[in-house]
Structures are given as C-alpha cells and as structure tokens.
Image (cartoon, rainbow, N blue to C red):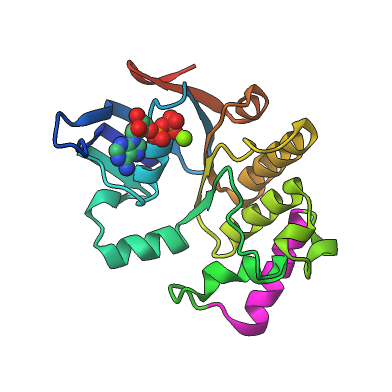
Amino acid sequence: MTAFIQLRDLSKSYESPGGGEAVEVFAGLDFELAEGESAAIVGPSGCGKSTLLNVVGALDKPSHGEVLVDGREVAKLTPEEAATFRNQTVGFIFQAHHLLPQCTVLENIMVPALAGHGDLSGDALRARAEALLEEVGLTHRLHHRPAEVSGGERQRAAVARALVNEPKLLLADEPTGALDQANTDKLAELLVQLNAKRNLTLLAVTHSAQVAARMAATYRLDADGLTKA
Ligand code: ADP
Ligand code: MG
C-alpha cells in the first residue's frame, strides 16, 4: 500500500530572532501513514508536535527533507496551490475552536466552503452543513452562537467545520486539550467514527492517553525522532 503521508528525512529549524544560532525543532524524521489510517503523536511540550502538523498541513515549510501528502510534495506547492490544499485536502482542528463569535454554529460550518476553492454553495452547502452537524450531534444547536453552546459542543462544531469541504486528511492539534473527561471521550469517539466511516486519514497530536489509545497507532516525537510507542 502506498503511503498517504510520507515524511523523508524531514527537518525544521527556525532562524533565531536575535540573529544567533538557528533553533532546531526536529531533524531527520521518517514516517509513513497509509490512507484511512489513524495515528496519535505524543511527546513533551515544545518537542515540535505543532510544528510537525503545520508542515504536513502546508501552514509552515520544512527546512530540509520531503513531505508527501496524497502523492503531492507539500513544500513545493505555490502559495495558491497551498491555499487550495489547506482548504480542500486538509481539515484542521486545534485546541481552541476558533469559531467566529458573531456567526451561528451553522454559518460557521459553511465558512470554509465560501473561500472560493470549491464549488459548493447555496442550498447544497447548507444541506451538507446541516448533515454534518447532525453527524456530530448538534442538530439542536444550529442557530446558536458559539458563546451559547458548551465547550464540548463548540469543539464538535469545529470538527464539522473541518469536514465541510470533504478533506481526505484530518490534522488535530490537542483537540481535547480544553475539554473535561466526558467531552474528551465523546470527541475521541467522534474522531474514530469519522476515520472509519469516511476513510479519513487522521493524525492527532494529543496529551490524552485516552485519545491516543483510540488511534490505530501511537508515535512519540522526541530527540530520537518519531518512533512507534
Ligand atoms: P509542541 O507543539 O510540541 O509543544 P511546537 O511545535 O509548538 O511544540 O514548538 C517547538 C519548538 O519550536 C519550540 O521550542 C518553539 O519555541 C519553537 N518554535 C515554534 N514556532 C516557532 C516560530 N514561529 N519561530 C521560532 N521558534 C518557533
Ligand atoms: Mg503544540
């Protein structure tokens, strides 16, 4: 089986703001994830987990090495291609929901489809957003604003928003970091279901042993690289 995500000798350093020695975040990472698989990435704070997800999702560029996603070299995409890739191929979920406070839950789900990269609009878009909100258990909250729903509900809305353009890859950066135990369970269950039902490849950075245990495999990122835990 060909890998859906493939990292080859991947390194990332940041220029030091003061002009001193560059800060190396990680170096020499090799990793593969097949289409439709799920994996957790764990490791201490500051080891580069967010940086790694950002490089895979074309939010940041590697310093060296290759990132292939669905056969495409992510670091070589033009800015326009990268924008389309982030909008159409990847769904992102972060620790904070980043929903727009002035929009309803339903409107928030439709926002990524209005960015002009896809062809969904009008009634078809609304129908898809409503179906997604049903899938994440939020049919009773369509017209509420983010401040009027619970933390768990906001994060499930963020999952629905990540899926509106039918991405092939879901990148989650500490998706349950702000949730209590019960909502962590619920979100983990939702991610597992989506992964299975939609053949969605899932890469989740997490500090939660509970969430990591639900993924098919767990990898640890540390000074030795990315190794199977
Ligand atoms: P993690 O998500 O594992 O906690 P991060 O990927 O956020 O770690 O950060 C890894 C390291 O890279 C940290 O030492 C951080 O200070 C550094 N870093 C992250 N982003 C930048 C940036 N834009 N400029 C400089 N250094 C950065
Ligand atoms: Mg992080």
Identified at 47% across, 22% down, the residue is 43
Q: Is residue 77 left or right of residue 201?
A: left
Q: Position of residue 228 (x, y in %)?
A: 45, 19
Query: In this view of the protein, which residue sits in the foreground, 162 or 2?
Result: 162
Query: In this view of the protein, which residue sits in the foreground, 34 or 102?
Result: 102
- The secondary structure making up most of the magenta span is helix
Identified at 39% across, 25% down, the residue is 47
- Image quadrant of ligand 1 equals top left
Please say if 116 is above or below 68: below
Q: For residue 223, which quarter of the picture? A: top left
Residue 57 on the magenta segment: no
Q: Which residue range is magenta in the image? A: 120-136
Q: Is residue 158 left or right of residue 42?
A: right
Identified at 69% across, 37% down, the residue is 188
Which residue is outermost to the bottom? 122
Q: Is residue 91 visible?
A: yes
Query: In this view of the protein, which residue sits in the foreground, 153 or 139?
Result: 153
Q: Position of residue 77 (x, y in %)?
A: 26, 58
Identified at 68% across, 76% down, the residue is 126
Q: Is residue 1 visible?
A: no
Query: In this view of the protein, which residue sits in the foreground, 106 or 20?
Result: 20
